[in-house]
Amino acid sequence: MATGKINVSVENIFPLIKKFLYSDHEIFLRELISNATDATLKLKHLTSIGEATVEYGNPIIEVKVDKDNKRIHIIDQGIGMTEDEVKKYINEVAFSGAEEFLDKYKDAGKDAGIIGHFGLGFYSAFMVAEKVEIISKSHKEEPAVHWTCDGSPEFTIEPSDKTERGTEIILHIAEDSTEFLEKSRIRELLVKYNKFMPIPIKFGTKTETLPKPEDAKEDDPAPTQEVDDIINNPNPAWTKQPADLEEADYKSFYRELYPMQFEEPLFHIHLNVDYPFNLTGILYFPKLTNDLSIQKDKIQLYQNQVFVTDNVEGIVPEFLTMLKGVIDSPDIPLNVSRSYLQADGAVKKISSYITRKVADKLSSLFKNNREDFEQKWNDIKVVIEYGMLSEDKFFEKADKFALYPTIDGNFYTFEELEAKIKDNQTDKDDKLVVLYASDKDAQHSYIEAAKKKGYEILLLDSPIVSHLMQKLETSKENLSFVRVDADHVDNLIKKEDTAISKLSDEEKDSLKADLEKVISDKGYTIQLEAMESSASPFIITEPEFMRRMKEMQRTGGGGMFGMGNMPDMYNLIVNTNHELVSEILNTKTAKKRERLINQSLDLARLSKGLLKGEELTNFIARSYEMIK
């Protein structure tokens, strides 16, 4: 038996490893199984090119928990190591990497870096183990070797009687890490990190029911057998070619990824590129709600089939983080800080590739089956609108397939909408005015008034639509979006012809003074307008600009601080040509005039959905009194 001292200047390197990476200590299993996988895949490569003369066979990786002896065993049937290779790769390479890691990060706190970046993967074992053994038999005709280290720079190395090719790592679990001696905890980690590793991973056995023999009686129990419990799927859908997969395969894989998700995805996008970077994956469009905050962190990021994270910001464009699925790339430098990631050239290329693939898929869905695309629009519009807002390249492509639904259930692209409404909805300044509603019921009376004019009204109700309208108005010429309750119908699209008021200027001044006396404390801006006599006498409107700024403030942005906390601002439009308005003006008693004004105002507020609580109760009581 030989003993030795690892040549490191940091004497207490193991406590430092444990301290700096404590928040990540569960990933020791991921790192060790990744090493076992690499060793197995290296053997596969060497046998395929004739450099290793052994039979590759059907190797597996086995994980065993020995709770009584406080040990975890990780056994592979891979390439193995000779004594010289153990000395080189374990004592020299990994430890120099460990030193570099500590040098770089010792002042940066726990989360500055992730284990593995500096060849430190094997030494993650010391985060949970007080002693580690390696027993390895190389594929070459050399004796097996047994290496032991107790977490200090001292190690021992001696021959071993191991006869099977491969490596076994034995972790003697430390007192503060006994949670990892629970089989349920290890299974949880295997499923989390190694669910799609390319080599089968065995964790114990399970009982499998076999078919009954033909001559078995009905009451006879079905025969069973103990089989290896393979916890991973070594050939997940994203590693296959799209031509080899059916629609059912994609749906089945979705259920594998999200076993608790009961709704089917709307459609999928298969990513597969090998130049100028390597990336594979499958993204799914799930049914989305209007609550953007609950949608994120559903895409899983893998590196060569090893799970890394489900926080994909910086790699996947922000607007696509609401999708689900898998991205796998060996080219993403995963073990460095997010700020580095976001500045990395390869990552930016990957991000723009994913954006382009998603846009192309949506475009082909729209062109190939528009009816189906329209049916799915409400479930996917938030992602598309968000993308149009945040990514200019996506905006250019999406402008051809983004849909604008009307309150009557028709769908138009912007180009189609423009062609349909330009004759009737262009104002005196040659600006195209797109009318929209955000709530069919709450804005019903305004919608009906606009429909009588022959106007087309869109139904735009997603939480970020205010931002999108702002973007469209600035990127297209002579365009304005106006909600149907932003003004009275004659003012929504200003034409040259304006109605003549039946009231003189003196009468208007008198009327305005009467109105202000009664409703001065209500916070309305009074506007006297000459409209058709059939239009409502009192109409409450909410100015488009102020309301939109408030909405944008609520969903982030808007450019004006505190706008979200400002009171709502309303205009009271009074139709000077309505007979009720003339009656208010000509009423001799102040009491009756006040009652007429209050009743008319409350009717307008009721139409706008603003009459609530005690004021609604008083209005109903007053209405009954008036009709007695």
Image (cartoon, rainbow, N blue to C red):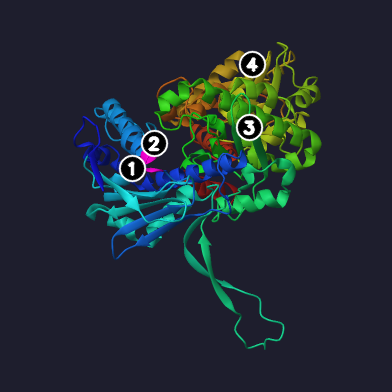
Question: Which label number is shown at residue 116?
Answer: 2
Q: Nearer the viewer, mark 3 or mark 1?
A: 1
Q: Mark 1: which amino acid?
A: Ser
Q: Mark 3: which amino acid?
A: Ile
Q: Residues within 10 Å of mark 2 (few under 14, many from 20)?
A: many
Query: Would residue 69 be found to the left or right of residue 208 on screen?
Result: left
**Residue 542 shows up from this direction:** yes
Q: Are marks 3 and 2 in contact (CB under 8 Å)?
A: no
Q: Are marks 2 and 1 in contact (CB under 8 Å)?
A: yes
Instruction: Work out whether mark 2 precedes mark 1 in sequence or the reverse, and give the earlier one.
Output: 2
Q: Secondary structure at mark 2?
A: loop
Residue 83 drawn in magenta: yes
Magenta stretch: dominant secondary structure: helix
Q: Mark 2: which amino acid?
A: Gly
Q: Secondary structure at mark 4?
A: helix
Instruction: Tell me if residue 528 comes above or below residue 102 in the rendering.
Output: above
Q: Residues in magenta?
A: 82-86
Residue sitting at x 57%, y 44%: 44
